[in-house]
Image (cartoon, rainbow, N blue to C red):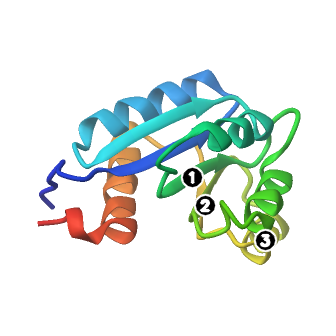
Amino acid sequence: MTFTPKHPLRIVMADDDPDDRMLTRDAFEECDAVDCAGFVEDGQALLELLTSLSPLPRLILLDWNMPRKNGLETLHILKASPNFKSIPVVILTTSTDSVDVASANAAGAEGFITKPVTFEGLVAIVQEMVARYAPELVL
């Protein structure tokens, strides 16, 4: 796929693992069609960031297991908010528990990606997200 950076897909990520944030940042840099609006360490920081962003992101990547507010708590708050409920949320987690997947889906997650992910795999996932959430960017 070829991407154009005219109006990139704006994404924010909440993940308490600095290595995962760095890997994701590097993957975003490989995709010209992505604008990273921010990386935060937990759900509480994500909610605080979102209240200050304009324009809002078009996609949120959310870790499942984080301090302060975990992924499920944060997802419930996002989907209950008139300002944020329409933003797609994709869960990133080391969990393969079917209960976690079902809980994420029931709470309104758009996808569930199991870590660890290789750099190449993450770039492919980011490209797939651009194609799904910003199809106008795919040539």
SS at circle 3 = helix
How far apart, in angstroms, are the residues tagged by discs 3 and 1?
14 Å
Look at the picture and state if 22 lies above or below 134: above
Circle 1 is placed at which residue position? 60
Identify the mark at residue 107; answer none if there is no mark. Answer: 3
Residue 112, percent from left and from top: 62, 63
Q: Are marks 2 and 3 in contact (CB under 8 Å)?
A: no
Q: Quadrant of residue 15?
A: top right
**Badge 3 local density, few (<14 within 10 Å), some, or many (20+)?**
some
| Residue 65 place in picture, x, y as percent | 79, 43
Task: Please state if 45 lies on the left or on the right of 112 as rendered.
Answer: right
Which residue lies under the disc numbered 2? 89
* Label 1: element kind: strand
Which quadrant would the C terminus be assigned to in this image?
bottom left
> In this rendering, would 139 be left or right of 33?
left
Report the front residue among 135 and 94.
135
Q: Residue at x 78, y 71 (%)?
A: 107
Residue 104 location (% of width, % of height)? 75, 67
Q: Nearer the viewer, residue 85 or 22?
A: 85
Question: Real-space Cα distance between discs 2 and 1?
Answer: 5 Å
